[in-house]
Image (cartoon, rainbow, N blue to C red):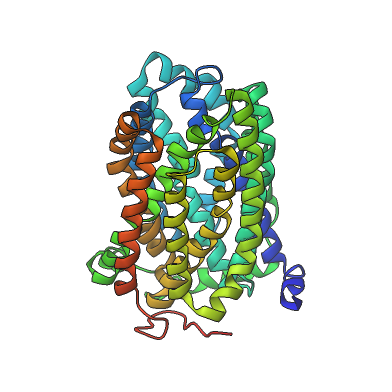
Amino acid sequence: MSKFKESFKNPSYLQSSLTLLLFFASWGVWWSFFQLWLTSESSGLGLSGSAVGTIFSANSLVTLIFMFVYGTLQDKLYIKRTLLIFSACIATLVGPFFIWVYGPLLKSNFNLGILVGAVVLSAGFLSSVGIFEAVTERFSRLFDFEYGQARAWGSFGYAIVALLAGFLFVKNPNLNFWAGSFFGLLLLLNLLLWKPKAEKIASKEFEDKQAESSSVPSLKEMFGLLRLPQLWAIIIFIVFTWTFYNVFDQQMFPGFYTSLFSTSAAGEKMYGTLNAIQVFCEAIMLGVVPIIMRKIGVRNTLLCGVTIMCVRIGLCGFASSPTAVSCIKMLHALEVPMFILPMFRYFTLHFDTKLSATLYMIGFQIAAQVGQVILSTPLGILRDKVGYQSTFRIISMIVLVAGVYAFFILKKDDQDVQGDPFIRG
């Protein structure tokens, strides 16, 4: 607790926390209802499951390209905010884009709308989320604060706007997009105007050392990561876990949940409230999971996260009442922190930390996007044919198999340590 209080005296922690809070607020206020906006007959575009799957696949394909570019650029930029500012500029314009460009294009020229939307959404949000997280994690190691506690503020921001988003969406979906622009503007101002002294010093020291070949990772080193068998083992694990989680949670769950209510409006309002409560609890757990991880280790925490993921998706394949599904949804608050935090720490433990942004983008974010490119449309078609719950049961079984695979391929915390050693507390 004393260390947590001490964090509030750390300007780098405060600035990083506010950055994540505003980014996730700008994204979450419209993203939490994106699938409903695409499918709703009354409040959105009324698209089919297969059409929505095609949109998600296209988004993931373009996101792959941006993620690799962003990852390699950020490792060269070190802690410079260039990419973050670029993403914040797009976030500021998200309202006008959705209302006057993206929505009309999807109605009048579906294929062109998919392409334009994939580029803008990937550049501003779907790819940049990994960079915001990677930069914050790097800051946490440089400026002595707990990454999980800073990341928790991102979830807290998402929780606040998720509660607001349900009411805005029922009133007028355009309000969600305008709110995204408002938070995007605050994010941009924060990045431009607040730069802690320690960060300025670190940036200057980095610039002074840039002439040294060892100080900046080369492209050869970055591409050399693709020759590592252990990285490919992790990529396979991510594709068959986090990918299926994303398809389930983003592409299917909102529509499934709102269908359990007598009217769409009632379901949309309740979904917004539930989402806010769940993400608020997730924010708390992001601060707690690092403590759990120090007790049971990185590998064991990650395996626990996969187990919860399998159980949550599987239970949604059997539950049919709003109350039961709402209770199951709350497992999400434990599942996400117990997956993303140990996954990040696994990379900095077993790989060279100099390439942490590239590793995180390739091994985690890009791997998940590859899976979505391949699986979003087929799973959307499957949902159209067999329904939500049968699809959920199939996804749960796949995640279970991936969890067994992970048990055998994940390295122990004291095995092959190439980065920062992990010491249990």
| Residue 163 visible somewhere in the drawing | yes
In this rendering, the answer to whether 283 lies above or below 420 is above
The residue nearer to you, when weighing 145 against 412, is 412
Q: Quick check: 123 left or right of 174?
A: left
Q: Residue at x 41, y 22 (%)?
A: 47
Residue 262 found in image quarter: top right
Q: How many marks?
A: 0
| Residue 240 visible somewhere in the drawing | no
In this rendering, the answer to whether 107 lies above or below 223 is above
Q: Position of residue 125 (x, y in %)?
A: 50, 43
Residue 337 found in image quarter: bottom right
Q: Position of residue 134 (x, y in %)?
A: 50, 61
Q: Position of residue 336 (x, y in %)?
A: 52, 57
Q: Residue at x 60, y 60 (%)?
A: 151
Q: Quick check: 424 left or right of 311?
A: right
Q: In the picture, which quadrant includes the C terminus?
A: bottom right
Q: Quick check: 338 left or right of 161?
A: left
Q: Position of residue 105 (x, y in %)?
A: 43, 19
Q: Residue at x 49, y 55 (%)?
A: 131
Q: In the picture, which quadrant includes the N terminus?
A: bottom right
In this rendering, the answer to whether 33 lies above or below 113 is below
Q: Residue at x 34, y 83 (%)?
A: 416
Residue 258 found in image quarter: top right
